[in-house]
Image: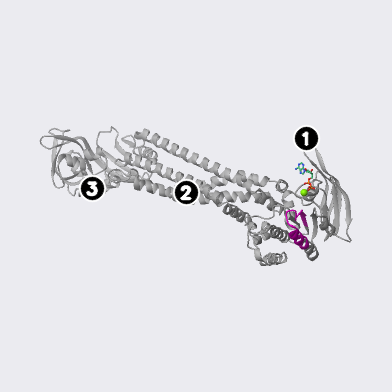
Amino acid sequence: MFTLNVAVRFLLKSRLQTFFIASGIAIGVGVLVFVGALITGLQEDLIDTTIGNSAHITVLDEKRNERFEADETLLANIISTDERIIAASRVIESGSAFIDSGDTTDPVLFRGVIFDDANAIYQFDEKLVDGNLPSSNDEVIIGVTLASFLEVSVGDPIDVTVPSGFPPANETYTVSGIFDFGSAQVNTRWVVASLTAGQSLLETHGVDAIEFQVSDVFMSDAIASALQTKLGDNYRVEEWQQSNQELLSGLEGQSISGIMIQAFVLVSVVLGIASVLAISVMQKSSQLGILKAMGATDQQSSLIFLFQGIILGLLGAVFGVIIGIALSTGFTMFALNPDGTPILEIIVRIEMVIFSAFIAVLASMIASLIPARRSARLSVIEVIRNG
Amino acid sequence: MVEIALKLENIRKTYGTTIKTEVLHGINLSIEAKSFVSIVGQSGSGKSTLLNIIGTLDRPSEGKVEIFGKDVASLKKRDLAKLRNTSIGFVFQHHYLLPEFTAYENIVMPYRITHRQLPKSVQEHANDLIKFVGLEAVKDNLANEMSGGQQQRTAIARALINRPKIILADEPTGALDTDSTEQVYKLLRDINRRFGTTFIVITHDKKVAERTDRMIEIRDGAITLDLEMH
Ligand SMILES: Nc1ncnc2c1ncn2[C@@H]1O[C@H](COP(=O)(O)OP(=O)(O)O)[C@@H](O)[C@H]1O
Ligand SMILES: [Mg+2]
């Protein structure tokens, strides 16, 4: 197509100008991609910190601190409510348990779970830094901080007391594994045994809660309310968003500021392209005049500039994506904690990259509309007369 | 009967909105197809204004322009562009070529404006024209890699690529030296004889004008002399 051909030649003729404007767009797109990735990373990190060690949805007894029977039928019934429920784990727990190590007593959260189910939520198996998951009812796993505090390692015994009954229930377990959740709370407090071990210590057949994981964490409210309706008033369904409103509005604020930054970057990109191309219309007015005299239509004249915008946008998008990914990778590689782990795992989403690139091309196209209009309006007579 | 290439009836052109200046005062003119006509006159007399109106680049304030019997006033902007592309070739004093393209590319440009493909036949035609205007050696040169005369000859070949019926030239040698001027006029005359293209050429050069079929003199926006040369 001749308009495309002319557009390319115009850009090639003013290489330096083309280079600068394409670089400008590329840097803009790079920032777009990087800021997007940074914010996604931050948000996933925050969400992970918040719900990485807890269930998305929890079903409790209506009175909250009473235990209830939870058999396979109830479990199956709940899971069938919504296909986005991807894991369910029954848990028995006591927050008033302590470990008696002779001279000191350390308060702990004693939990009993079915590891095969609970792993889907907590990944105990992946978080073990030493030993194995309990293979019998007299084994428990504890956190690294607690282990070092108690000076116990795998194979050592610990003495767990639950003061709720009289006389207080008491059991000695062998530490079969030590886990690290990366959370001080969990690492110092949790002692996890099998569900049957827990039920036996707490002298019950019931559970304190059933915990659930859902595939879309932000749908937990909808799923929870469906569950509540289904289970009726005997149960109480809680979900993470309800108890984390501040976090959620924080995330929203972050998203908005990210979008603001991206919008300003876009505006400056658009202004840059528009001004360069507008100058270019003046520079190329003689050529445009000739083309029009030879029969180029006004539409064709504007297409020449529209194509220049699109080409600049495409160039900028390609190099911008490279810059953005490089920045993100660099950040993950070089911004490190003292222990060598990245401060933040930046997440470059392919759909976000494509979106940024697409926006860049679209913005460039829009930016070229004004020059395109000018080019369409350019009068042959003016050009010829002022030659 | 001789075909009429161009017919002007009472062409007036007024510039300005508050202070109106009429620069063409009712021009009547009829030009036969295949003739070679020169327009002479002092600077500012209205020659370019007239030629631009003839070439549909400008509209008259009053009067009628007919090109090969077609009244151009009825045509829309897009149709005028099409008419210029297919039927009229322009050669200007300045603005010879697109500097971003080679001589050859400039020559085929008018064809490419209205066609997606460049068929073999058009390529051959372009090469014939290049030979005809004597540019084989520089056909792949960019504009600034050619002399003024070569550039103008490229522009002439370009004006011919769509085999137009009329070529309009506004002081085509105004920026050229004597040798190049001579060369260019010889070329235009050859084209006129060989292809039967109608020429309307504005020139300062009386000697050039005297060698054309018909010389029209314009003074202060009116025709003051109209001479058939033979
Ligand atoms: N756009 C315009 N506005 C006002 N006056 C114009 C304009 N274009 C041309 N003129 C005037 O019209 C007259 C004829 O100009 P022109 O056709 O260029 O003359 P020539 O080509 O014979 O030198 C001149 O006096 C010129 O100043
Ligand atoms: Mg003039």
Residue type, label 3: Leu
Residue that sits furthest to the front in the current view? B178
Asked whether residue A83 is in view, the answer is no
Residue drawn at x 83%, y 57% is: B207
Residue type, label 1: Thr
Query: Is label 1 in a helix, a strand or a loop?
Result: loop
Task: Find residue A80 and report its horizontal and vertical position in percent.
Answer: 35, 46
| Chain identifier of the residue bearing label 2 in the image | A
Task: Find residue A32 and report its horizontal and vertical position in percent.
Answer: 46, 44
Task: Find residue A291 and report its horizontal and vertical position in percent.
Answer: 68, 53
Residue A128, label in figure: 3
Q: CA distance from mark 2 to mark 3?
A: 41 Å
Magenta residue span: B167-187
| Chain identifier of the residue bearing label 1 in the image | B
User: Which residue in the protein does label 1 denote?
Assistant: B18
Query: Is label 3 in a helix, a strand or a loop?
Result: strand
Q: Do marks 2 and 3 share a chain?
A: yes
Q: Do marks 1 and 3 share a chain?
A: no
